[in-house]
Each structure stands twice: as C-alpha cells, then as structure tokens.
Image (cartoon, rainbow, N blue to C red):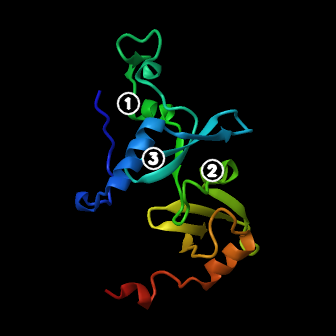
Amino acid sequence: QTLTASLPHNLPPSDLTAELIGQLRRQKTEGPTKLGVDPSNGATVYVKFGPYGPYVQLGEDSTKDAKKKPGKKDGKKDGKKDSKKDSKKQDKPKRTSLLEGMTVEGITLETALKLLGLPRTLGNHPESGKPVVAAVGRFGQYVKHDGQSTTVKAPSNVLDITVDAAVALLAAAPAKGGPRSRKV
C-alpha cells in the first residue's frame, strides 16, 4: 500500500527536504492530534494538517455513508431537490486555521476552543451601543464596528483583545473613502 501526503501549497517542490518528507509522512500515518473534549457540547477537538497549514477542528469528519439520508431514494424532499450545498455545509465540522505565529506544539484545548469561537462579540461600543466584533478574515485579524474595521496587530490578537482596546484601535484607524484611499 502506497502512502501519499499533500505538500503545503506554498512550498515549491525544489525546497522539499528529507526532514520535511519525514514530517509529512509522520503526520499522515499518526493522523490528527486529539486535544480534548469541548465541555459545552461533548465534541472532540483535534489539531489537523491541511494543504494550507495546521488547523483545529471541532467534531468528527463525516463519512459518505453519514451523508446519505435514510429513506430518501430519489433525492427529493417535498417535491423539491435537496440542495447539495446545504447538506455539505451541515455535514462539515467547524474548522479554523491557527493564527500567524502559533505552532502546533504550543496549541492547547483552551486556545483551540477560543479559535473555534471566532468571530466573537467583545461588547457594545460605549458611544453607539452597537456590538464590537473580533474576527479573522482573508487578510488577517481584525475588529469591526458599525461598518468600520481595522487590523489587529501584534502584540494584540483577536483571542484576548478587550472591547476598550478594540474601540481605541477603531478610533485610531483612518477613515475610509478619504484622500488616502485614492492613491494607487
């Protein structure tokens, strides 16, 4: 039986070393690392490796057999087609990538549960009363409030930033749509 493992998407094959090959093989044969159980719902929390790097997962992967609904032969429900997109979304466990600078060795159950809890509401803005939210997006960590958002930079992070620190970051952020945003 042949063992195959995917290379990380940002690793050129020319940079592949014997040490990295050994690490990829170990990850594939040993499987995911179990961190513990989420006390709120009893689901197991894992650290796994994907093509874009390590991530944490809440719950088990679904299997093809689990995706089939019992008693459905023609794939229709009340005369309508089942939405494949909706059923896939329901079957997938919650997953979140590790933040920049985090290592697999340093991740704990507590940190993994915080990551899986994102985005999180920090509290209400003292002036507007609207919620201030901390999250991770395509371009990194950020906080947002009432349509305005700004990046959270080190040493702060979205896992432990307070509402007061987030309000200060938002107040210091330049207003969008001004002359600075028109520069090429």
Q: Secondary structure at mark 2?
A: helix
Horizontally, is 8 left or right of 101 in the view? Answer: left
Amino acid at pointer 3: Phe
Residue 125 at least partly seen: no
Q: Position of residue 51 (x, y in %)?
A: 37, 49
Percent coordinates x, y for residue 96 in the rendering: 53, 50
Q: Quadrant of the C terminus?
A: bottom left
Is the residue under label 1 in contact with that under label 3 (CB below 8 Å)? Answer: no
In this rendering, is residue 71 above or below 67? Answer: above
Q: Secondary structure at mark 1?
A: helix
Residue furthest toward the left? 14
Compare residues 18 and 3 and report the one nearer the observer.
18
Task: Name the side, left or right, on which 168 lies relative to 22.
Answer: right
Q: Residues within 10 Å of mark 2 (few under 14, many from 20)?
A: many
Q: CA distance from mark 2 to mark 1?
A: 29 Å
Q: Tag 1 or tag 3, which sits nearer the N-term?
A: 3
**Which numbered circle lies on residue 84?**
1
The mark lying in front, picked from 2 and 3, is 3
Q: CA distance from mark 3 to mark 1?
A: 26 Å
Name the amino acid type tagged 2. Answer: Ala
The tag earlier along the polypeptide, 2 or 1, is: 1
Residue closer to the observer: 108 or 15: 15
Q: Residue 159: where, in percent of width, then height?
A: 65, 62
Q: Which residue is mark 3?
A: 49
Q: Which of 88/128 is in front?
A: 88
128 w.r.t. 110: above or below: below
Using residue 125 as the reference point, say whether residue 175 is left or right of it.
left
Whichever of labels 2 and 3 marks the residue nearer the N terminus, that label is 3
